[in-house]
């Protein structure tokens, strides 16, 4: 059990199998759950949470934290809906550009002024959310292109859609860059030990700024696609994306201490979350219970990650023995 | 050599000796000087290191070794003097330039990322790595570097986190080789290593030497100087004392060269009467630090534990303070057993810790002097958890007076004080904690000027007079001889000697902590 759980990329997929089995058992083996419709809805959920979880996860790998993703997502949705009436791809491009610039600013401030990411991106979350609120005037903006809304959600091969394919592509590109390129290696080096990376000659500042720009762009991509698919954008609805994205990254094997985690693992983490939701829905569980179950899964993953857990448990026993035995 | 050339020129492990005859000068510095304000850290130092030479550099703490290293690696810029690398005069203004000239430092604190593989660490930050980095070519050259160092047992795919300290040292050296380092500077490379690992490092260094590259080897351990160096340069107080062939000087002669400071009257007379044993330590062991250490410390007595970095002296005091989670052994305070491993438990039994790392383990830098002085005694000045400001104020004022800090400054922040005064705060915190305190100190006067030192030594004697027992780990031998009522010498985790005041001499102690074999004979 332990060596299997120790592989951070494999772990979320093992969890996935366990969850499928558990839901199947809870369902009494009736198989109501295993339909193409469920798979489709899981993947749609993946398309919504995935890009944000990826961007956030990348910032966590360099031992930072991008809290602004929720705000960026709302803002990007508004930008896309407002500028993409004529040409939908142009809307997405504008939104992604805005996300990249916003991330660049946040990263630049952090590196230049040597500030922590929590403070800066918390400011970003409020600022971006606020701008979205002002732009929309606290109303939902309708996206008049229903054809596009249909197109991005059109089923492909029964379970996929354009939206989930784009999310998947983003993950695969990220996985390649992280595993195969110098930049990916430098990212892990920075998360593992920033001082050592700096001494070894890694351009730390540039990469930190780049990761935040990327995180902004990914949040914008997710937000604009979601707004297209809902044919609406609003300032408030999307800011609570942060919690599921963080949970997905952690379940996916990203460590809060940095330097660990892979994009493939994050895919697994997002799927675990989406599947839990869909599965518990299918067997008729209340939403509050779903949160409790999700919380339990997170706790288990956190325990598996605890630094030298066994030693600590053991050490406590030794003290007990020494003191009272 | 420019960065562009470095990037294009394939950096190979071809022996450099072919390009230059063995006796030619690789690195030469002339009349190098560096001052910090009025203090001269290095004065008129001239060195000439040949290709393929391993040069030892010895000297006490503060002799100027680290200043020299920082000048050679571009961290500091010299006030005067010149540096010549392979016959070409050059200016080393930045660490980057030092790298381009082929001068590489393997510092005590390594620069490896634990989550990356050995191969990735070797190439980390190198300008030669293409965008898609996993080229067979790079892998081959990383493997070659490891083979050259006799470290082919280290798997390229292994995570650095899984390697021992000695293996990490070898990976770091391999990284420098792939970057075409012509002069390797090693700063106390063996401080944390076992015998087997030291032998491996030595074999690797000899292989590097055979390539015609030069090595500057900085160490306190004279045995190692004799084991590996060709010549040794001795620094003292920032000045070059001598550069000698090791064949021409014996250990006693080398110690003679390193010492020679007049000892002044900064140490107050010790108290004479022997108190009851306050602290009994039996077979204290910290894995990788100290083995089977036993001693008794009496009230009113200062025990000095003398040793260089890695000797285990630090581990003894931190274990007593409860800061080493894996310490084993029996410790009794006033006859009652103390379970090690918890600073809180140790503090409850009256063990107080004063660290040389003032910023990390000493004072609360951002709090006021007042808050620092009363931090450990809030409980005595509270009613149902509410602090009595008035009684705290009088206490703080009294403590400030005792440690010699102006009463009117108590509202100032601790980091506004000099290092010496900050350390006095740490001592002030331990004053008047009832009879029966035990003060354990780790290099308490590190980085502190002479005047403040004298005051701190006076404070130590006041603690003795108040019935405290003091344990002091120090690598400053003058201090050890000056304040210690009992001196214990350590070498690599084992006790070498134990002396009463007056029995120990500087020569005896230097011999003990640098080379125990010599001491035994």
Image (cartoon, helix red, strand yellow):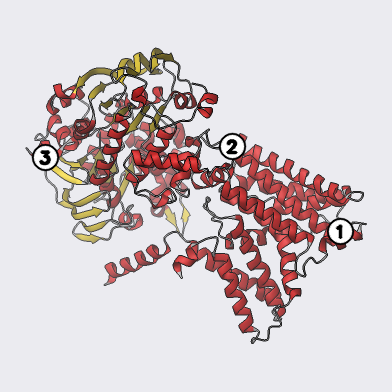
Q: Which is in the foreground here, disc 2 or disc 3?
A: 2
User: Callout 3 environment at 10 Å: few (<14), some (14 to 19), or many (20+)?
Assistant: some
Q: Position of residue A35 (x, y in %)?
A: 73, 77
Label placed on residue A205: 2
The secondary structure type at the circle numbered 3 is strand
Labels 3 and 1 in the same subunit: no
Residue where numbered disc 3 is placed: B499
Q: Position of residue B406 (x, y in %)?
A: 40, 31
B206 vs A232, left or right, is left
**Residue B34 lies in what quarter of the image?**
top left
Disc 3, disc 1: CB below 8 Å?
Answer: no
What is the distance, in whole Å, between disc 2 and disc 3 at their CAs?
54 Å
**Residue B456 lies in what quarter of the image?**
top left
What is the count of numbered marks? 3
User: Callout 2 environment at 10 Å: few (<14), some (14 to 19), or many (20+)?
Assistant: some
Query: Of the residues under marks 2 and 1, which one precedes in the sequence?
Result: 2
Disc 2, disc 1: CB below 8 Å?
Answer: no
Residue, x 79% and y 58% (percent of image)?
Answer: A226
Question: What is the quadrant of the C terminus of chain B in the image?
Answer: top left
Which chain letter matches label 1?
A
Residue, x 26% and y 48% (percent of image)?
Answer: B289
The secondary structure type at the circle numbered 2 is helix
In the depicted view, which residue is nearer to us: B468 or B492? B492
Q: Position of residue B104 (x, y in %)?
A: 40, 29
**Residue A113 lies in what quarter of the image?**
top right
Labels 2 and 1 in the same subunit: yes
Which chain letter matches label 3?
B
Residue where numbered disc 1 is placed: A232
Picture layout, residue B414 above or below residue A130:
above
Q: Which is in the foreground here, disc 3 or disc 1?
A: 1
Labels 2 and 3 in the same subunit: no
The secondary structure type at the circle numbered 1 is strand
């Amino acid at each position: 059990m332990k060596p299997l759980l120790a592989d951070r990329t494999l772990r979320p997929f093992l969890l996935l199998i366990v969850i499928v089995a558990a839901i199947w058992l809870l369902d009494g083996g009736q198989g109501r759950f295993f339909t193409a419709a469920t798979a489709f809805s899981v993947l749609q959920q993946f398309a919504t949470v995935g890009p944000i979880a990826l961007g956030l996860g990348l910032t966590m790998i360099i031992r930072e934290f991008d809290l602004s993703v929720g705000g960026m997502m709302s803002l990007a949705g508004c930008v896309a809906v407002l500028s993409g009436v004529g040409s939908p791809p142009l809307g997405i491009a504008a939104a992604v550009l805005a996300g990249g610039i916003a991330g660049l600013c946040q990263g630049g401030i952090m590196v230049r002024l040597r500030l922590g990411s929590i403070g800066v991106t918390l400011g970003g979350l409020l600022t971006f959310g606020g701008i979205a609120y002002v732009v929309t005037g606290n109303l939902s903006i309708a996206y008049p292109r229903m054809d596009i809304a249909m197109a991005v959600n059109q089923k492909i091969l029964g379970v996929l859609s354009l939206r989930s394919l784009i999310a998947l592509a983003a993950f695969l590109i990220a996985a390649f860059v992280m595993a195969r390129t110098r930049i990916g290696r430098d990212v892990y080096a920075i998360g593992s030990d920033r001082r050592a990376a700096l001494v070894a000659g890694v351009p730390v500042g540039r990469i930190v700024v780049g990761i935040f720009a990327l995180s902004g762009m990914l949040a914008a991509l997710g937000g604009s696609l979601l707004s297209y698919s809902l044919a609406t954008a609003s300032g408030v609805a999307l800011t609570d994306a942060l919690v599921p994205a963080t949970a997905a990254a952690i379940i996916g094997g990203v460590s809060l201490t940095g330097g660990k985690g892979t994009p493939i693992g994050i895919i697994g983490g997002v799927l675990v979350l989406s599947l839990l939701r869909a599965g518990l829905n299918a067997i008729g569980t209340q939403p509050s219970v779903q949160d409790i179950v999700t919380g339990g899964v997170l706790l288990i993953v956190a325990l598996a990650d605890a630094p030298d857990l066994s030693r600590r448990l053991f050490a406590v026993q030794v003290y007990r023995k020494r003191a009272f035995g | 050599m420019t960065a562009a050339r470095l990037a294009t020129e394939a950096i190979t492990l071809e022996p450099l000796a072919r390009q230059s005859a063995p006796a030619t000068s690789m690195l030469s510095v002339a009349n190098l000087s560096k001052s910090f304000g009025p203090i001269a850290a290095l004065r008129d130092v001239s060195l000439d290191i040949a290709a393929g030479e391993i040069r030892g550099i010895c000297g006490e703490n503060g002799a100027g070794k680290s200043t020299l290293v920082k000048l050679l690696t571009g961290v500091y810029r010299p006030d005067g003097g010149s540096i010549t690398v392979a016959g070409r005069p050059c200016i080393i203004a930045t660490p980057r330039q030092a790298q381009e000239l082929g001068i590489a430092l393997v510092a005590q604190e390594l620069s490896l990322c634990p989550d990356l593989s050995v191969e990735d660490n070797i190439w980390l930050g190198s300008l030669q790595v293409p965008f898609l980095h996993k080229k067979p070519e790079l892998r081959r050259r990383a493997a070659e570097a490891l083979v050259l160092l006799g470290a082919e047992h280290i798997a390229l795919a292994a995570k650095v986190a899984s390697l021992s300290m000695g293996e990490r040292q070898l990976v770091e050296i391999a990284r420098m080789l792939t970057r075409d380092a012509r002069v390797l500077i090693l700063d106390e490379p063996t401080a944390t290593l076992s015998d087997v690992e030291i032998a491996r490092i030595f074999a690797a260094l000899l292989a590097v030497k055979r390539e015609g590259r030069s090595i500057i080897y900085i160490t306190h351990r004279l045995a190692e100087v004799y084991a590996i160096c060709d010549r040794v340069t001795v620094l003292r107080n920032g000045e070059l004392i001598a550069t000698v062939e090791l064949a021409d000087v014996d250990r006693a002669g080398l110690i003679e060269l390193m010492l020679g400071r007049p000892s002044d009257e900064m140490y107050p007379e010790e108290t004479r009467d022997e108190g009851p044993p306050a602290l009994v330590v039996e077979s204290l062991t910290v894995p990788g630090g100290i083995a089977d250490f036993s001693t008794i410390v009496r009230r009113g007595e200062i025990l000095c534990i003398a040793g260089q970095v890695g000797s285990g002296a630090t581990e003894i005091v931190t274990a007593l303070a409860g800061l080493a989670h894996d310490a084993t052994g029996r410790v009794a305070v006033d006859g009652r057993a103390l379970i090690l491993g918890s600073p809180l438990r140790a503090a409850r039994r009256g063990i107080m810790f004063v660290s040389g790392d003032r910023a990390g383990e000493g004072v609360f830098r951002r709090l006021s002097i007042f808050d620092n002085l009363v931090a450990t005694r809030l409980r005595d000045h509270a009613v149902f958890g509410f602090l009595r400001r008035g009684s705290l104020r009088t206490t703080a004022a009294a403590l400030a007076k005792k440690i010699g800090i102006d009463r009117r400054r108590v509202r100032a922040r601790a980091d506004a004080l000099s290092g010496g005064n900050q350390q006095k705060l740490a001592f002030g915190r331990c004053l008047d904690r009832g009879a029966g305190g035990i003060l354990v100190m780790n290099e308490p006067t590190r980085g502190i000027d002479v005047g403040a030192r004298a005051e701190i030594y006076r404070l130590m004697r006041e603690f003795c007079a108040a019935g405290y027992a003091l344990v002091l780990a120090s690598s400053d031998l003058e201090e050890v001889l000056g304040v210690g009522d009992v001196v214990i010498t350590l070498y690599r985790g084992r006790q070498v000697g134990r002396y009463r005041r007056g029995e120990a001499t500087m020569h005896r102690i230097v011999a003990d902590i640098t080379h125990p074999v010599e001491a035994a004979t």
